[in-house]
Amino acid sequence: MNNYLTEQDIKKMKDEIEYRKVVVRKKCNEDVKEARAHGDLSENYEYKAAKRERGRNEGRIKYLERMIKTATIINDTTSAEEVGLGKDVTIYFIEDDFEVDYKIVTTMETDALNNKISIESPLGKEIYKKKVGDEVKVNSPDGEYTVRINKISTKK
């Protein structure tokens, strides 16, 4: 797994790891210790919940560390006229005759529900560094389709 991340993404991830190790881990351990003191562990919901939360925190730390370890650091070198990181792009789906606005982001910021697509996604890969008016074929798990780039803007 190779994630394309910026230096800012790596910094955010390192900050989150540090917070989880120093603050969240300490709180989780205190919660487990307190719940353990309530007696019979076989029927102690608080104990089980505290252990589950501690496991989630440790899992998130491992996930972030793995993302950093496997990351490929990128610098966006696109011009103002090209699709690039942090830019809003209006895509016209030719076969389906409709437009959608997307924001191009790195792996860490991907959020399909809010139309933030990664440059690693099938669509993101194909439109990255393309210009307004360019038509590209996209191979996705659902099949091939053609899109045209109608607009590029850099609003933040």
Image (tube, rainbow, N blue to C red):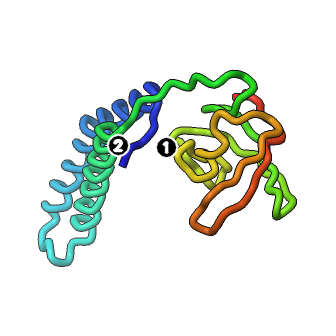
Report helix, strand or loop for mark 2.
Answer: helix
| Residue type, label 2 | Met
Rendering coords of residue 65 (x, y %): 29, 41
Which residue is situated farthest in the right direction here? Answer: 97
Q: Earlier in the sequence, mark 1 or mark 2?
A: 2
| Residue type, label 1 | Thr
The residue carrying mark 1 is 107
Q: Quadrant of the C terminus?
A: top right
The residue lying at 25 percent from left, 50 percent from top is: 58
> Residue 125 is drawn in which quadrant?
top right
- Mark drawn on residue 67: 2
Rendering coords of residue 18 (x, y %): 29, 33
Report helix, strand or loop for mark 1.
Answer: helix
Circle 1: is it few (<14), some (14-19), or many (20+) Cα within 10 Å?
many
Residue nearest the observer in this picture, 113 or 90: 90
Circle 2: is it few (<14), some (14-19), or many (20+) Cα within 10 Å?
many
The residue lying at 26 percent from left, 47 percent from top is: 62
The residue lying at 29 percent from left, 64 percent from top is: 49
Tell me if label 1 and label 2 are in contact, CB under 8 Å.
Answer: yes
Rendering coords of residue 106 (x, y %): 52, 39
Residue nearest the observer in this picture, 51 or 8: 8
Q: Is residue 148 above or below residue 88?
A: below
Q: Is residue 18 above or below residue 62?
A: above
Q: Disc 1 versus disc 2: distance between alpha carbons?
A: 9 Å
